[in-house]
Image (spheres, helix red, strand yellow):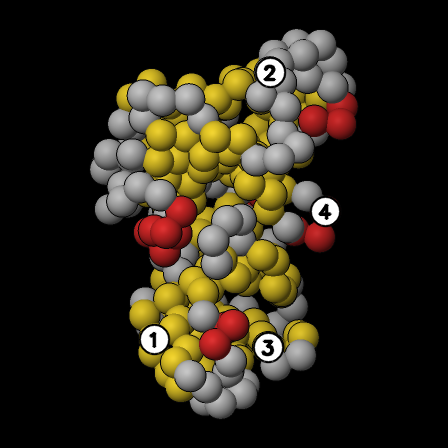
Amino acid sequence: EDKVVQSPLSLVVHEGDTVTLNCSYEVTNFRSLLWYKQEKKAPTFLFMLTSSGIEKKSGRLSSILDKKELFSILNITATQTGDSAVYLCAVVGYGQNFVFGPGTRLSVLP
Amino acid sequence: GAVVSQHPSWVICKSGTSVKIECRSLDFQATTMFWYRQFPKQSLMLMATSNEGSKATYEQGVEKDKFLINHASLTLSTLTVTSAHPEDSSFYICSATDAGGVSSYNEQFFGPGTRLTVL
Protein backbone atom coordinates (compact mmCIF):
# COMPACT_ATOMS: atom_id res chain seq x y z
CA GLU A 1 0.00 0.00 0.00
CA ASP A 2 1.37 3.38 -1.00
CA LYS A 3 1.93 5.77 1.87
CA VAL A 4 3.67 8.98 2.79
CA VAL A 5 4.73 9.81 6.32
CA GLN A 6 5.71 13.28 7.47
CA SER A 7 7.42 14.33 10.66
CA PRO A 8 7.05 16.14 12.84
CA LEU A 9 3.30 16.64 12.52
CA SER A 10 3.54 19.92 14.36
CA LEU A 11 6.41 22.30 15.06
CA VAL A 12 6.70 25.62 16.87
CA VAL A 13 9.79 27.76 16.42
CA HIS A 14 10.86 31.37 16.78
CA GLU A 15 11.73 33.73 13.99
CA GLY A 16 15.25 33.20 12.78
CA ASP A 17 15.33 29.50 13.58
CA THR A 18 16.12 26.89 10.96
CA VAL A 19 13.72 24.00 10.54
CA THR A 20 13.93 20.66 8.79
CA LEU A 21 10.77 18.87 7.74
CA ASN A 22 10.85 15.20 6.89
CA CYS A 23 8.95 13.12 4.39
CA SER A 24 9.36 9.38 3.93
CA TYR A 25 7.44 7.30 1.44
CA GLU A 26 6.58 3.92 0.07
CA VAL A 27 5.07 4.05 -3.39
CA THR A 28 4.87 1.79 -6.39
CA ASN A 29 6.86 3.00 -9.37
CA PHE A 30 7.96 6.32 -7.98
CA ARG A 31 7.86 9.20 -10.43
CA SER A 32 8.33 12.35 -8.36
CA LEU A 33 7.97 13.94 -4.95
CA LEU A 34 6.39 17.32 -4.47
CA TRP A 35 6.39 19.79 -1.61
CA TYR A 36 3.52 22.23 -1.10
CA LYS A 37 2.86 25.03 1.35
CA GLN A 38 -0.75 25.35 2.42
CA GLU A 39 -1.99 28.44 4.21
CA LYS A 40 -5.66 29.04 3.66
CA LYS A 41 -6.75 27.84 0.29
CA ALA A 42 -5.03 25.74 -2.32
CA PRO A 43 -1.61 24.34 -1.56
CA THR A 44 1.15 26.38 -3.17
CA PHE A 45 3.70 24.40 -5.11
CA LEU A 46 7.25 24.62 -3.77
CA PHE A 47 9.42 21.93 -5.30
CA MET A 48 9.30 18.86 -7.47
CA LEU A 49 12.07 16.33 -6.97
CA THR A 50 12.78 13.42 -9.25
CA SER A 51 16.49 12.71 -8.85
CA SER A 52 18.43 11.78 -5.77
CA GLY A 53 21.01 14.06 -4.27
CA ILE A 54 20.21 17.17 -6.26
CA GLU A 55 19.25 20.02 -3.97
CA LYS A 56 16.56 22.38 -5.14
CA LYS A 57 16.67 25.85 -3.68
CA SER A 58 14.33 28.81 -3.65
CA GLY A 59 15.29 31.67 -1.38
CA ARG A 60 15.37 30.39 2.18
CA LEU A 61 13.81 27.08 1.24
CA SER A 62 15.66 24.07 -0.03
CA SER A 63 14.84 20.42 -0.53
CA ILE A 64 16.59 17.22 -1.41
CA LEU A 65 15.52 13.69 -2.25
CA ASP A 66 17.09 10.36 -1.34
CA LYS A 67 15.54 7.68 -3.54
CA LYS A 68 17.60 4.93 -1.96
CA GLU A 69 16.39 5.64 1.54
CA LEU A 70 12.99 6.81 0.28
CA PHE A 71 12.81 10.19 1.95
CA SER A 72 13.03 13.89 1.35
CA ILE A 73 13.69 16.87 3.59
CA LEU A 74 12.55 20.44 3.31
CA ASN A 75 14.74 23.02 4.99
CA ILE A 76 13.71 26.53 5.86
CA THR A 77 16.42 28.86 7.14
CA ALA A 78 15.96 32.14 9.00
CA THR A 79 12.27 31.43 9.46
CA GLN A 80 9.75 34.26 9.39
CA THR A 81 6.19 34.45 10.70
CA GLY A 82 5.03 34.28 7.10
CA ASP A 83 6.42 30.77 6.90
CA SER A 84 3.71 29.59 9.27
CA ALA A 85 1.65 27.08 7.31
CA VAL A 86 1.10 23.41 6.74
CA TYR A 87 3.76 21.85 4.56
CA LEU A 88 2.52 18.95 2.49
CA CYS A 89 4.60 16.26 0.89
CA ALA A 90 3.08 14.32 -2.01
CA VAL A 91 4.50 11.46 -4.01
CA VAL A 92 3.40 10.69 -7.54
CA GLY A 93 3.47 7.04 -8.48
CA TYR A 94 2.46 4.79 -11.31
CA GLY A 95 -0.50 6.13 -13.21
CA GLN A 96 0.32 9.57 -11.85
CA ASN A 97 -1.78 9.06 -8.75
CA PHE A 98 -0.95 11.37 -5.88
CA VAL A 99 -0.26 10.14 -2.36
CA PHE A 100 -0.27 13.00 0.11
CA GLY A 101 1.26 12.94 3.55
CA PRO A 102 -0.60 14.31 6.57
CA GLY A 103 1.37 17.53 6.53
CA THR A 104 3.59 19.29 9.05
CA ARG A 105 2.03 22.28 10.76
CA LEU A 106 4.73 24.91 11.26
CA SER A 107 4.13 27.85 13.56
CA VAL A 108 6.76 30.59 13.62
CA LEU A 109 6.50 32.91 16.60
CA PRO A 110 7.79 36.49 16.50
CA GLY B 1 -7.29 6.03 8.99
CA ALA B 2 -8.38 9.18 7.17
CA VAL B 3 -8.43 7.73 3.67
CA VAL B 4 -9.95 9.56 0.74
CA SER B 5 -10.56 7.78 -2.52
CA GLN B 6 -11.45 9.03 -5.98
CA HIS B 7 -13.11 7.25 -8.84
CA PRO B 8 -12.26 6.90 -11.61
CA SER B 9 -8.52 7.41 -11.41
CA TRP B 10 -8.34 8.07 -15.13
CA VAL B 11 -11.03 8.87 -17.67
CA ILE B 12 -10.97 9.63 -21.37
CA CYS B 13 -14.04 11.09 -22.99
CA LYS B 14 -15.18 12.75 -26.17
CA SER B 15 -15.72 16.47 -26.41
CA GLY B 16 -19.26 17.45 -25.46
CA THR B 17 -19.87 14.62 -23.03
CA SER B 18 -20.20 14.89 -19.28
CA VAL B 19 -17.95 13.17 -16.80
CA LYS B 20 -18.64 12.48 -13.14
CA ILE B 21 -15.82 12.12 -10.62
CA GLU B 22 -16.48 10.72 -7.16
CA CYS B 23 -14.66 11.59 -3.98
CA ARG B 24 -15.24 9.41 -0.94
CA SER B 25 -14.03 9.55 2.63
CA LEU B 26 -13.61 5.92 3.58
CA ASP B 27 -13.28 5.95 7.34
CA PHE B 28 -14.52 9.30 8.52
CA GLN B 29 -17.38 11.66 7.92
CA ALA B 30 -16.36 14.59 5.79
CA THR B 31 -18.33 17.67 6.61
CA THR B 32 -16.36 19.61 4.04
CA MET B 33 -14.78 18.54 0.80
CA PHE B 34 -12.59 20.59 -1.51
CA TRP B 35 -12.07 20.18 -5.23
CA TYR B 36 -8.80 21.20 -6.85
CA ARG B 37 -7.55 21.31 -10.39
CA GLN B 38 -3.90 20.93 -11.20
CA PHE B 39 -2.32 23.44 -13.50
CA PRO B 40 1.07 23.49 -15.20
CA LYS B 41 4.08 23.70 -12.94
CA GLN B 42 2.27 21.53 -10.42
CA SER B 43 0.16 24.29 -8.91
CA LEU B 44 -3.20 23.33 -7.48
CA MET B 45 -6.15 25.65 -7.93
CA LEU B 46 -9.03 25.44 -5.50
CA MET B 47 -12.21 25.19 -7.53
CA ALA B 48 -14.85 24.90 -4.87
CA THR B 49 -15.65 24.02 -1.30
CA SER B 50 -18.62 21.81 -0.62
CA ASN B 51 -20.38 21.22 2.65
CA GLU B 52 -22.66 18.27 3.12
CA GLY B 53 -26.23 19.12 2.41
CA SER B 54 -25.66 22.60 1.07
CA LYS B 55 -24.59 24.25 -2.15
CA ALA B 56 -20.93 24.39 -2.99
CA THR B 57 -19.01 27.63 -2.75
CA TYR B 58 -17.14 28.25 -5.97
CA GLU B 59 -13.95 30.21 -6.31
CA GLN B 60 -13.86 33.24 -8.54
CA GLY B 61 -13.55 32.32 -12.17
CA VAL B 62 -14.91 28.78 -11.80
CA GLU B 63 -18.10 28.19 -13.77
CA LYS B 64 -20.78 26.73 -11.54
CA ASP B 65 -22.81 25.38 -14.44
CA LYS B 66 -19.83 23.67 -15.95
CA PHE B 67 -18.44 22.08 -12.82
CA LEU B 68 -21.39 20.71 -10.89
CA ILE B 69 -20.61 19.68 -7.35
CA ASN B 70 -22.90 17.61 -5.19
CA HIS B 71 -22.12 16.69 -1.58
CA ALA B 72 -25.11 14.52 -0.85
CA SER B 73 -23.73 12.59 2.08
CA LEU B 74 -21.02 12.87 4.69
CA THR B 75 -18.82 10.45 2.79
CA LEU B 76 -19.39 11.34 -0.85
CA SER B 77 -18.95 14.38 -3.04
CA THR B 78 -19.15 14.35 -6.81
CA LEU B 79 -17.78 16.69 -9.43
CA THR B 80 -19.44 16.57 -12.83
CA VAL B 81 -17.68 18.23 -15.70
CA THR B 82 -20.51 19.05 -18.10
CA SER B 83 -20.02 19.33 -21.85
CA ALA B 84 -16.33 18.68 -21.46
CA HIS B 85 -13.87 20.23 -23.89
CA PRO B 86 -10.19 19.55 -24.46
CA GLU B 87 -9.24 22.56 -22.34
CA ASP B 88 -10.90 20.82 -19.38
CA SER B 89 -8.30 18.09 -19.58
CA SER B 90 -6.47 18.16 -16.29
CA PHE B 91 -5.87 16.43 -13.03
CA TYR B 92 -8.66 16.87 -10.50
CA ILE B 93 -7.94 16.27 -6.82
CA CYS B 94 -10.34 16.28 -3.91
CA SER B 95 -9.66 16.60 -0.24
CA ALA B 96 -11.83 16.18 2.80
CA THR B 97 -11.92 17.36 6.35
CA ASP B 98 -14.06 16.38 9.26
CA ALA B 99 -13.51 19.59 11.14
CA GLY B 100 -15.19 21.90 8.68
CA GLY B 101 -14.05 25.23 7.27
CA VAL B 102 -10.91 26.66 5.75
CA SER B 103 -9.44 27.30 9.19
CA SER B 104 -8.99 23.58 9.60
CA TYR B 105 -6.80 23.26 6.55
CA ASN B 106 -4.31 21.21 8.48
CA GLU B 107 -6.80 18.41 8.73
CA GLN B 108 -7.39 18.01 5.03
CA PHE B 109 -6.90 14.55 3.65
CA PHE B 110 -6.24 14.36 -0.06
CA GLY B 111 -7.46 11.86 -2.60
CA PRO B 112 -5.22 10.35 -5.27
CA GLY B 113 -6.63 12.47 -8.06
CA THR B 114 -8.45 11.80 -11.31
CA ARG B 115 -6.84 12.44 -14.66
CA LEU B 116 -9.36 13.66 -17.22
CA THR B 117 -8.48 13.62 -20.89
CA VAL B 118 -11.02 15.12 -23.27
CA LEU B 119 -10.52 14.23 -26.92
Q: Helix, strand, or loop for circle 3?
A: strand
Q: Which residue is mark 1?
A: A11
Q: Assess whether mark 4 and mark 1 are in contact (beta carbons under 8 angstroms).
A: no
The chain carrying label 3 is A
Disc sitting over residue A61 in the figure: 3
Q: Mark 4: few, some, or many residues within 10 Å (few <14, many ≥20)?
A: few
User: In this view of the protein, which residue sits in the foreground, B60 or A71?
Assistant: B60
- Are discs 1 and 3 located on one and the same chain? yes
Residue A90 seen: no
Q: Helix, strand, or loop for circle 1?
A: strand
Query: Label 2 vs label 4: CA separation?
Result: 24 Å
- Are discs 3 and 2 located on one and the same chain? no
Disc sitting over residue B40 in the figure: 4
- Are discs 4 and 3 located on one and the same chain? no
- Mark positioned earlier in the residue sequence (2 or 4): 4
Query: Label 1 vs label 2: CA separation?
Result: 42 Å
Which circle, 1 or 4, is nearer the viewer? 1
Q: Which residue is mark 2?
A: B65
Q: Which residue is drawn at the image coordinates 61% and 64% (left, top)? A: A46
Q: Amino acid at mark 3?
A: Leu
Q: Helix, strand, or loop for circle 4?
A: helix
